[in-house]
């Protein structure tokens, strides 16, 4: 099963599932790092059912939400009817957004699901305006292989040095990767193995 098929299948349950993994402190930390301003335009890449999008809308931003799963986007649309949001289905290496369009690009727990993280980062950088920011929140490298089988993760987190390398190679400046101070927590449905994985927040300026 691909990541897209997995998220198509769990779309209706994703909001309740997500609450078991991490809290709203994740997006609040990302927004502080980005320095978001009301009235700006942000992209939520790998938007899912709108965890990041919801916070951005609450802070007065316009949002472009992109996900490869149409089922996830259907849930997102139903939650934010009438809000200042545009939703598009798109792939990690071909986002349906023009060059230099957004003030910020956010991606939460997205990178470990893509085939080529470096190319996905470069594609997100493409859509950011000069002076805009890319902010990622994702998992540090970890040993919990059951996440590949049960949640269809492609990558078991990342070394922070890898993130710095990809950000820098994509032309970003002022690159930082810091501990967010939160863990992503889950438990295997098959053997009961418990995982508590530290989350990083990475940022860079175009």
Image (tube, rainbow, N blue to C red):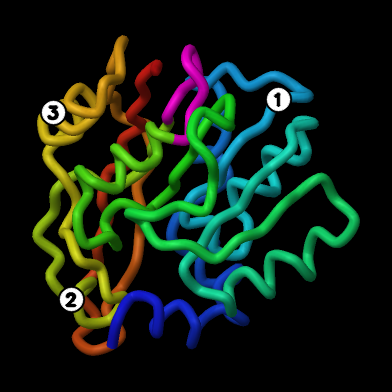
Sequence order check, earlier mark of 2 and 3: 2
Residue 65 percent location from the top left of the image: 61, 52
**Nearer to us in this view, 120 or 136:** 120
Quadrant of the drawing holding the C terminus? top left
Residue 15 percent location from the top left of the image: 60, 68
**Nearer to us in this view, 152 or 25:** 152
Mark 2: few/some/many CA within 10 Å (<14, 14-19, 20+): some
Decide if residue 64 is on the left or right side of residue 173: right
Q: Identify the residue shown where x is 79% and y is 70%.
A: 78
Residue 83's place in the image compared with 124, above or below, is: below
Q: Which residue is mark 3?
A: 165
Q: Identify the residue shown where x is 70% and y is 48%.
A: 54
Residues at discs 2 and 1 in contact (Cβ within 8 Å): no
Mark 3: few/some/many CA within 10 Å (<14, 14-19, 20+): few
Q: Identify the residue shown where x is 50% and y is 73%.
A: 69
Residues at discs 2 and 3 in contact (Cβ within 8 Å): no
| 68 falls in the magenta region | no
Decide if residue 174 is on the left or right side of residue 41: left
> Distance between the Cα atoms at labels 2 and 1?
39 Å
Q: Residue furthest right?
A: 82
> Residue 7, labelled with which disc?
none
Residue 31's place in the image compared with 9, above or below, is: above
Residue 4 percent location from the top left of the image: 40, 77
Q: Which dot, 2 or 1, sits closer to the camera?
A: 1
User: What secondary structure is found at the residue carrying circle 2?
Assistant: helix
> Residue 40, labelled with which disc?
1
Sequence order check, earlier mark of 2 and 1: 1
Q: Which residue is mark 2?
A: 146
Decide if residue 88 is on the left or right side of residue 94: right
The magenta segment is 127-134
């Amino acid at each position: 099963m691909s990541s897209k098929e997995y998220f198509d299948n769990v779309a209706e349950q994703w909001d309740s599932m997500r609450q078991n993994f991490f809290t709203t402190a994740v997006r609040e930390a990302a927004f502080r790092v980005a320095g978001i301003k009301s009235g700006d335009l942000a992209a939520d890449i790998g938007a899912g059912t709108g965890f990041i999008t919801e916070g951005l809308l609450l802070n007065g931003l316009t949002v472009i939400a992109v996900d490869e799963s149409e089922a996830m986007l259907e849930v997102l649309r139903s939650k934010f009817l009438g809000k200042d949001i545009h939703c598009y289905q798109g792939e990690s290496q071909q986002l349906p957004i023009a060059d230099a369009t957004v003030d910020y690009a956010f991606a939460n727990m997205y990178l470990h699901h893509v085939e080529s993280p470096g190319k996905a980062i470069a594609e997100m950088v493409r859509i950011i305006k000069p002076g805009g920011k890319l902010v990622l929140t994702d998992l540090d490298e970890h040993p919990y292989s059951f996440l590949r089988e049960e949640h269809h993760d492609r990558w078991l987190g990342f070394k922070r040095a890898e993130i710095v390398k990809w950000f820098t190679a994509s032309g970003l400046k002022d690159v930082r990767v810091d501990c967010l101070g939160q863990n992503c927590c889950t438990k295997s449905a098959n053997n009961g193995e418990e995982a508590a994985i530290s989350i990083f927040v990475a940022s860079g300026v175009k």
